[in-house]
Image: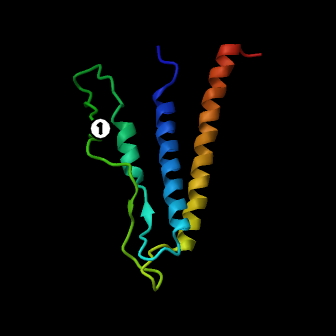
């Protein structure tokens, strides 16, 4: 019997994505004045493919369709250069306003994942301690 469901693993993958996204945004903001620095970003799709790769579906009838998620091999979760736009005269490709908006969006995403994870752990705690 598994103590933690696949939902917990998906939440963990989402938190890993959010942490890497935070690092990329922080690097972009820190290098806003660095000549020829190109803004970095992290793709959500690579984290999603990695979390879906472990899902197994039970087929109980020949009429059921098999569930085979796309393979996560070859996907990279590393930050990549998001664009070749140059926003400053020194060749820098960081738009501070965009980075700050991405930072706020990522913070909201992170907080929602934490709330979901806390709810899951609260349910486990209630089961272990017993409802009162």
Q: How crowded is the residue under tag 1: few (<14 C-alpha within 10 Å), some, or many (20+)?
A: some
- The quarter holding residue 43 reads bottom left
Q: Residue furthest bottom?
A: 89
In this rendering, would 89 be left or right of 128?
Answer: left
Count every numbered label the image shows and give the total: 1
Figure quadrant of residue 107 = bottom right
Residue 38 percent coordinates (x, y): 41, 70
Viewport quadrant of the C terminus? top right
Q: Which residue in the protein does label 1 denote?
A: 69
Percent position of residue 49, x then y? 35, 43
Residue under the image location 58 percent in, 60 percent down = 103
Which residue is located at x 40 percent, y 45 percent? Answer: 47
Nearest the camera: 108 or 22?
Answer: 22
Left or right: 132 with respect to 76?
right
Q: Is residue 29 shown above or below 65?
A: below
Query: In the picture shown, does residue 15 fall above or below 125?
Result: below
Q: Residue at x 64, y 40 (%)?
A: 115
Left or right: residue 61 versus residue 99 is left
Looking at the picture, the colour scheme in use is: rainbow
- Whole-percent x, y for residue 54 in the image: 35, 31
Between residue 58 and residue 51, name the one nearer to us.
51
**Which structural element holds mark 1?**
loop
> In the picture shown, does residue 22 fall above or below 14?
below
Q: x, y (%) of residue 76? A: 33, 49
Q: Residue furthest front?
A: 35
Up the image or down, 71 lies above or below 78; here it is: above
- Residue drawn at the location 53% of the way across and 70% of the way down: 98
- Residue located farthest toward the right when viewing the structure as drawn: 132
């Amino acid at each position: 019997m598994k103590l933690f469901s696949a939902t917990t693993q998906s939440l963990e993958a989402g938190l890993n994505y959010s942490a890497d996204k935070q690092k990329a945004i922080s690097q972009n903001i820190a290098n806003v004045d660095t000549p020829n620095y190109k803004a970095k970003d992290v793709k959500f799709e690579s984290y999603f493919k990695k979390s879906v790769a472990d899902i197994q579906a039970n087929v109980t009838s020949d009429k059921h369709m098999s569930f085979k998620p796309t393979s996560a091999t070859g996907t990279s979760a590393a930050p990549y250069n998001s664009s070749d736009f140059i926003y400053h005269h020194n060749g820098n490709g960081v738009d501070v306003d965009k980075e700050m908006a991405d930072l706020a969006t990522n913070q909201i995403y992170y907080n929602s994942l934490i709330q979901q994870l806390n709810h899951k752990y609260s349910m486990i705690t209630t089961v272990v301690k017993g409802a009162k």
